[in-house]
Image: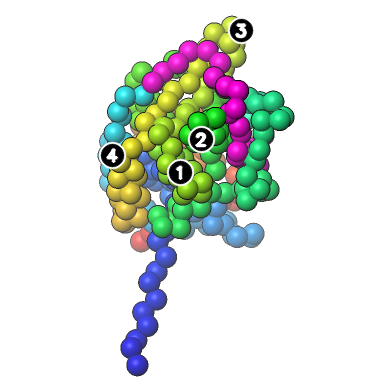
Amino acid sequence: MPTVVAVPEPEHLTPHDLVTYFRCPHEMELHRARRRLLPGDTALEVRTPADVVPLRHSPLFPPPLGHPEVYDGPFDVFPGDTLVYEDPTERGLPVLFAPEAVRLDPRYRSPPGTLVDRELGFAGRPDLVIQRASGEILPVEYKSTHLYVGYHESHGRAFDTLQAVAECRLVEVAFGRRPRHGVILYGDAAGEGAHEGWVEIPYAEAEASWLRAALRQIRSDPVRAPVPVERNCAACEPNAEGLCRFAAARYEGPHRPAAPPGAVAVPAR
Ligand code: SF4
């Protein structure tokens, strides 16, 4: 009788994991440990050892930065375009479509509405998915910020790119068609819309390969080291909760998320 060996499931990852790992692997580890807390738990078991050597940069190599197209002004919606997905857990998303052009896919209409990629062990929720009249499909990630704040720095472009690539892959799996690009929509309507704009980020074979390699790298990282860079630490939610021992700056974000009562991070030995 042959022995049946159970193959372990790959660690489940999300676009948020990808973004936080790219900023600071330890931040990703703290977020994930926080999500695993059971009622009554106060200790976050993280894989980062207490004697870890902090890094100057994330070990994740950046996505291909390709040739994103940058557009000023309100996002273009044309006759025949339809909205086929909207994150059912998100509030405050922009209303881009008239009611008759909203045809949400019933598989994802109710919470949690998560798009799941079983092959890569990856899942998440774009803000919107649009189907153009031509049949082309594309994910849209909405940000309430200004198009040009940091966009032309390679740092900001890399964050946009990896988020758009991750969402394109999820849309490809969920809807059975490969998007040619993903959209990051900047909705800062100040100055009568003068600050609005969007960026189309290509999704082709190079980007899809990068995503597979990035997920492999995250899963094989035994340490998830901190990258204590002031700019990152000042916006880091686990830092706002006093969970990071390596922070290079105080949290300066717009709000302080509620910390699990008495939570403390317990490093690996
Ligand atoms: S405070 Fe800084 S070093 Fe610590 S997890 Fe956050 S980004 Fe990383």
> Depth-wise, is mark 4 or mark 1 nearer the camera?
1
- Three-letter amino acid code at the position of disc 1: Arg
Residue 148's spot in the image, x, y percent? 44, 15
| Label placed on residue 206 | 4
At numbered mark 3, what does the secondary structure look like: helix, strand or loop?
A: helix
Tell me if residue 51 comes above or below residue 82 in the rendering: below
Say whether disc 2 or disc 3 marks the residue closer to the N-terminus. Answer: 2
Q: Which residue is mark 1?
A: 177
Mark-to-mark CA distance, 4 and 3: 38 Å
| Label placed on residue 192 | 3
Say whether disc 1 or disc 2 marks the residue closer to the N-terminus. Answer: 2
Magenta highlight range? 69-91
Say whether disc 4 or disc 1 marks the residue closer to the N-terminus. Answer: 1
Characterize the magenta stretch by its predominant secondary structure. loop
Magenta includes 71?
yes
Q: Which residue is mark 2?
A: 135
Residue 226's spot in the image, x, y percent? 35, 43
Tag 1–tag 2 contact (CB < 8 Å):
yes
Most foreground residue, 211 or 102:
102
